Structure formats: structure tokens, C-alpha cells
Amino acid sequence: MQSRKVISKPQKESLVSPVIAAILSAIIPGLGQILARVVNRGLIILASFVTSLGLLIWRIATEGSRYTGWRTVVSKAYKLNPFLYAITALMVITYIYGIVDAYLTARPGAKKSKAIGMIFLIILVFFMQGWEIGQIDMGALFRDADEAVPALSKVVWPWEKAISYPEEYRTTIIDVQTPCTDVPFPAGEIKTDEPYLIADPTCGVPSVVEVSQGTEFHVVGGNFVPGKPVEFWWKDSANREFHHRVDGDYLIVTPDKDGSFEVSVIMPYRTLTAAAEEGVKVWQIQARQLISVGKAEFSEELKLAVEKMIETIFIGMMATFFGIILAIPVSFIAARNLMSHSPVTMAIYYLVRTILNIIRSIEPLIWAIIAVIVVGLGPFAGILALTLHSLAALAKLYSEAIESIDSGQIEAIQATGANWFQVVSHAVIPQIIPPFVSFTIYRWDINIRMSTVIGFVGGGGIGYLLAQWIRILDYRSAGIAVWFIAITVAILDFVSADIRERFV
Amino acid sequence: MLQIKNLTKVYPDGTVALKNVSFEVPDGEFLIVIGLSGSGKSTLLRCINRLINPTEGEIIWNGIDLSKLEGEDLRKARRKIGMIFQNFNLVKRSSVFSNVMSGRLGYSRTIPSMFGQFSKDDIEMGRKVVERLGITSQMHKRADELSGGQQQRVGIARALMQEPELILADEPVASLDPVLAHSILKTLETLNQEDGLTVICSLHYLDLVQRYGTSVVGLREGEVVYRGSREDVRKMTDEQFKEIYGAEAERVGASIEGSVKG
């Protein structure tokens, strides 16, 4: 404890009395503290107060933007968003706390109190404002969770879509006669080894629009593939095929576990030529079912995902190659210890550093958008974007490795009478190779990760597919892409960590 | 014979590291440079092999003024001057043997040596030097895996590969404990006595100075404040020592020396 007393600075006396300090802090928060010679605390209070007040006014104006007259705006804003009450209350507490703090700090001989309470309150105010501005709504996480489950479960386990069976439509038919005659039209028969249809009655008349409903046929089917949907079609007397509709929708029936179904269809209206209409004609009711034929095979989506994943890995790899090749020369002119001889080289150093910082501070996704404008959609745009970003990041890391070279080792090799090339090969390169390798592998890792998303903005690779599949709500295929990305990134993570450990 | 004449070094920031330093070192001497940190010891040693360029003065060695040499001539002169460092300055990630072989760079052709290729005779010589310093079993380890004392032996081996006539040792034992300090200094003493190498070594402790030095130069703020022969050094009192070092000087090594001898 004693040592602490020795270190602590003597307390500076306040310039104003406690009451004045309190009053000043009431007029401008923080002013009392500033004049009580705790300037930093006062400035923080002032800045925080101004900022949070500004934010509050902005939020009130936004909430009440549909109203006129500031009184209405304010009252409506608070009514619409009661959270603003909490923020305002907390700000008032902070304001009063600031006044009390100014009074206490300005007392003569007062111990320098800790500002923790004040800082806690200020942080709390900003936290609440952040909550409000960020429209944080924890309820949303659970409210519609049910609806997300089917989509999410498809993403989590998409492999049904990885395998496909070649499919084709099998059409089963039953003829019906129109109109009915004295001779009964034969009904279908029950078959044992193939699908069949039976219609009852076996003849009827088509509908006439706004006049009469056509005959209702009761159709029984058997020996269909259980669980696979069956569509119904007609073939009219003019041999034209068309979907059967009920209130505008296609009629689709799913057979039961025995492969049987029963359904009623009303003979529809058709405009027919005189030749097709006159006399006794035969129509056909068709039941079409999409069934699997042949062996299982990998689905188109899976093949596409594999192809695009390979493309993705190569986008990352090429970008890393180009990045290394460009970054090595640049890193030498971005290394302070190599460029500090003269004002000219220092100017180059600062210029290069600034450009690198600017390139690096723009995300690869944004570079990809720019690259797409220049070279069009596709992997090349992705490679360009990642190359640019890698160049900037690697040049910075490389140059820092060069800057941290131990000059003692260079000195020692120089002292043996070695020439410049020998000094570089024996003292400089051995020192920079390990960090170069390490940074490069790290970058390769990042580039593969980035190349998976660069497709979202048209930069090629699996991201392009993923974005498309998400847009058409094909969650299973999207799930396959996500799985591939996750597996690839995990493997690379492991490999790169392993290689880096060996070198460093 | 090495003659330092009116050597002055002023750094670009205006620090005067050496002021008009003059002294002579006859061949075969074990000269010890003493002085506080910042008194100019390191600068002095580095001026001799021109890792630092002196501002003024001459460094005459075997009739040649080292301070005027440039390029190839300078490198040829450097080959004959081995240097040992306080922090060993080994290339940490390279093997012990490749560190030792780097002492041969000044004699080797540029292109093969850049890829670590040395002549058979050089490699044979490397083996012998490594054996002489008792680090054969460590030969293939990475340099930074060795203990401090062993690393300094590698440093000495590297210097010996230069077939030097002069060895500059910049506080070679400052990073080592007293037992190892004696061991390293005895190695240098052997080289001095058996191989007839001139040694210029900077040191801190009076005990070590008295035990190993055949003559002493004392530096204070870049100026020579003491010059003594072996006999003078033996008789040197703590008071004289303190004159060079200031009041904070201490004898540290005495008890250890006893233990080594015992």
C-alpha cells in the first residue's frame, strides 16, 4: 500500500467550488468535472452525452416521421416505441449522476474517486441505444421457428438429393364413350400384374359452359406405385391431350399403400370441330405416374456441386499464387528497414503502404463486384478480386517479417567476409522463409474460404450455385453445397495448421 | 601488429561513441577492453572489421589501413578477422554445421555457397573444428536448440573456419553464467596461446580480466582512460577498477573461479 501512495500524483485542487461545479455540470454535462481538474472524465461525459442525445433525437424523429409538429412527433414516437422511455430514463439518471459526481469531485481535498459508476452508466446507455437501433428482437428467434424447420432440416441433411433415379411417366388409360348409346361400352378390367383403371359409368357427355355439368366418372385405379403422385389427363375425340383440372388446379392423387385409389372426374368442356363432335366418339382418361426406372445414380446437383467445388479450390489457389508473386517484390519496398536510407525511398515506402492499406481495407466481395464489371461473371473475376486482396495482405505481412529480421545474424555473416549475395542467402532468407511460408498458407486458407462466398456476387465457384439454389428455394441442393464448403474448409484448416506447425 | 590511431566515431544522431582513441596491439596478445555499457567497446570492435565505418582515424593492421578498404579488399581483410558476439548471432533456424560452414563463405565461390555447397576440403575442415570445440554430437541440431554455452562454441567454430589471425569478441560471456564464462574464455585462451591468434575481447568483470588478459584498455565515454600490461592488471585494485566503471562496479566472479579450479 505504501508504494502506491508514493506513486500516486498529488491531488490537483478544483478550480471551482463544489456547488458551482454541480451547477455547471447541470448546464453542460462534464463541464463541472473539467473545471474540477478531472479533464478526461469531463470530456468523456460531455462527448457521451452529446452523442447519446443526438442518437435519441434521431430515433424520435424516425419513429414519429409520419407526424407533424414536434410535440406530436415526440409523443407518438414514445407511444410507438416504449423502449425509448427506458433509454430516456437512464439518460436522466446518468445526467444526475454526473452532477453529483461533479459536486463530489470538486470538494476541497476530495479523494480522487473512481469513475467506474459513471462509465458503467454511459456504457449502459449506449448498450440500450444499440439494442434499440439494432432492432434486436429475441422473440423473432422463436416465433416463426416452426416454419424454418423444414427448410433447415433439408439443409442439415440434404443427401436424398445426392442420388437420383432415372424417372419416366407411365400412362394408364381407360376409354369412355360419348354420348351413351344402347350398346353398353365395355368397362376396364382388373389386372393382376400391371396398373389398370376402371371407370363408372363407361359413357357420358362433356360439360357445356354455363349450361350443364358433364358426366361424373368414378374412376378406380389399382397396381400403381404407392405414395407417388398420379396426374390425370384427358384425350378428347380430336386426339388432343390435356390436364384434368378441378377449379383451375391440376388433379393429383396419391395411391395408398396397396397402390390403389378412387377419384371422381367430371368430363370437361372442349371446343371441337364438327367432325370430332358428331356421332359416337371415344375419349380417354389417362392416369400418369412418374416412376423410377433403372439404377440409382449421382444426381445432377451433386455433380454440379463437385465441379464447382473444384473450381472454388482453384480460384483460391490461383489467387494465392498470383498474390505471392506480386507481394514478394512489393514487400521489399514496403519494409521500413530497407527503405529508410533517404527521403525518396521513405516517400515510396509511405505511398506503397498507404495503397496497400486502402486495398486491404476494401473487402474481397466488393473487389469481386468491381472485377465482375471489368471482366464479366465467372471465376476469373473471383481470382482477380482475391489476388488483389491477397497482394495487399501478404505484402504487409511479408514486409513486417522483413522488418523483424535480426540484424545480428546479418552482422555475423558480414563479418566472415561474405559478399552481398551470400549475406542474403545465409542470413536474410533463412530468417524470412518461415514467416513467409506461414503467412502464405494462412492466406491460402483465407482465400479458399473467401472463394466459397465470392460466387454470391458473380465471382464463380460454388457460391454462385449456392446463391442460385437458395433463390429458387431448393434447400436440399443448397444443403449439399453448404456441406461441401464445410468439409473443404475443415480439411484445409487442418492441413494448413499442420503445415504451419512444421515450419514455425 | 594492430595500430589504432586517433579513431573517432560520431553516429548520425550526433552521439560521439569514440573520441580520438589510439592504442597498439602486438600480435599474439589477449587484449581486454573494459568499460561500462555505452562506453564505446562494441563500436571500437566493430570499427576494426568495419561493420561500422569510423568517422576519422586509422586502423593499421599488418601494414594495411582497414578504415580505407572497400568492396573485395574489405571482404578479404574481414576473412582474417573472426568475430564472436554476446548474443552469439547464429542463424537460428539453420543447423549447427551450416552455421559453422558459413565461416567459410569469404573463401567460397558465390553461386555454390548460396545453395550451401562447399568444397570437400572446407567440409573436412568444418568437421575438425566442430570436433575441436566438442560439439560434434550437436552438429545436425538446429542452432537455437543448443544451450547458451554450446551456441557460443558454434560462434567460435564459425570464427575459426575463417582461419583468422585476429579474433574480436564482443562481450562473449555476458549472456552466460560464470562457469560457462570461464569455459568459453579458456577456449579463447587456448586459441591465443596454442594457435597464436591475437584476441581482442570486451569484458565486464575484474576477476575475468585479471585471469585472462595479457593487457587491458579501459574506455569511458569513448575515450581511453586506462592502458595496462598483464602485470598492471594483476596489481589492479578495486579502486582503479571503479575509476573506469564508476561506483557501481562489483567483483562477481571470484568465488566461481575458485570453484572451477577446485
Image: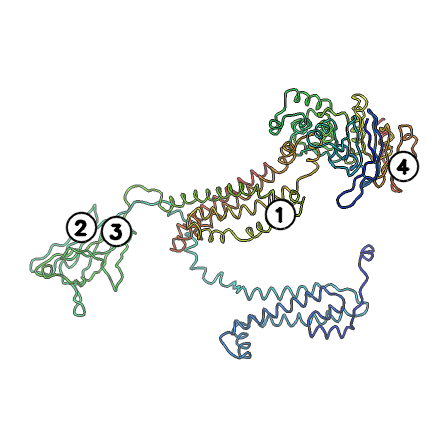
Graded by Cα atoms within 10 Å as few (under 14), some (14 to 19) or many (20 or more), the crowding at tag 2 reads some
> Alpha carbon of mark 3 to alpha carbon of mark 1: how far?
72 Å
- What kind of element bears circle 3? strand
Tag 2's secondary structure? loop
Q: Earlier in the sequence, mark 1 or mark 2?
A: 2
Check whether the beta carbons of the residues at disc 3 and disc 4 lie within 8 A of each other. Answer: no
Label 1 resides on the chain identified as A
Residue marked by disc 4: B241
- Viewer-nearest of discs 2 and 4: 4
Labels 3 and 4 share a subunit: no
* Residue A151 position within the rendered picture, expressed as x and y whole percent measured from the top left: 41, 55
- Which of the two labelled residues, at mark 2 and mark 3, occupies the earlier sequence position? 2
Q: Is residue B186 left or right of residue A257?
A: right
Instruction: Judge if badges 2 and 3 mark residues of a common chain.
Output: yes
Q: Quadrant of the N terminus of chain B?
A: top right
Amino acid at pointer 2: Ile
Q: Nearer the viewer, residue A75 or B221?
A: B221
* Numbered circle sitting on residue A190: 2
Identify residue for label 3.
A289
Element assignment for label 1: helix
